DNA sequence: AAACTGACGTGAT
DNA sequence: CATCACGCCAGTT
């Protein structure tokens, strides 16, 4: 199947991206209160394995004020907040997470304690 | 069109 | 623990 070019059909990576964004946001909303996931885990769970950067791209487009989606529950694989230290969103993310019981030790979160096991039974959604 | 830039991750040094 | 090289890929220069 080849990509189609033409006025009416822009069936290319852009469409795939929109689909991916949809899947990622949907999965993001399923993360239980007080739990965290890494970018790669979210990508994997959403059905886009190996696309951690895509998740980052999607989240970066989200308004940090949106309480509709728990964007704060996504941190990097090292258990650290990925947002730049100088960004006001950085401390905000930590504050939001701590408010839901997530513990930071030396600036890091333990996946052992707070990682979302996708197999968790009856997760308490917000 | 080519180079650069990330809210990334993993493996090697 | 710190760096680097890669793989990844949409957006921006």
Image (cartoon, coloured by chain):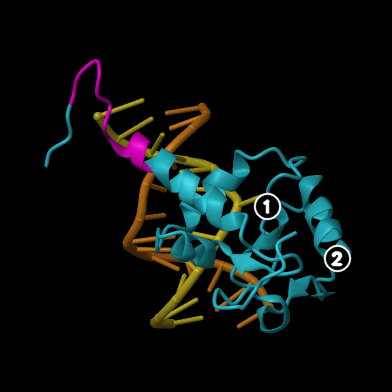
Chain colours: A cyan, B yellow, C orange
Label 2 packing within 10 angstroms: few (<14), some (14-19), many (20+)? few
- Residue drawn at (43%, 39%) of the image: A18
* Chain holding disc 2: A
Up-down: is A96 above or below A102? above
Label 1 packing within 10 angstroms: few (<14), some (14-19), many (20+)? many
Disc 1 marks which residue? A71
Image quarter where the N terminus of chain A lies is top left
- Residue at the extreme top of the image, as rendered: A7
State left or right for residue B3 relative to residue A26: left
A109 magenta-colored:
no
N-terminal-most mark, 2 or 1: 1
Up-down: is C13 above or below A8? below
Up-down: is A100 above or below A113? above
- In the depicted view, which residue is nearer to us: A96 or A82? A96
- In the depicted view, which residue is nearer to us: A76 or A43? A43
Distance CA(mark 2)–CA(mark 1): 14 Å
- Residue drawn at (83%, 54%) of the image: A91
């Amino acid at each position: 199947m080849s990509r189609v070019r033409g006025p009416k059909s822009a069936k290319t990576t852009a469409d795939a991206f929109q689909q991916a964004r949809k899947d990622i946001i949907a999965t993001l909303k399923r993360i239980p209160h007080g739990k965290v996931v890494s970018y790669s885990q979210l990508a994997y769970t959403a059905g886009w394995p190996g696309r951690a950067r895509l998740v980052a791209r999607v989240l970066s487009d989200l308004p940090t004020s949106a309480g509709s989606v728990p964007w704060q529950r996504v941190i990097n694989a090292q258990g650290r907040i990925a947002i730049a230290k100088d960004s006001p969103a950085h401390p905000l993310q930590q504050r939001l997470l701590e408010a839901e019981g997530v513990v930071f030790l030396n600036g890091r979160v333990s996946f052992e304690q707070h990682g979302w096991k996708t197999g968790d039974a009856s997760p308490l959604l917000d």
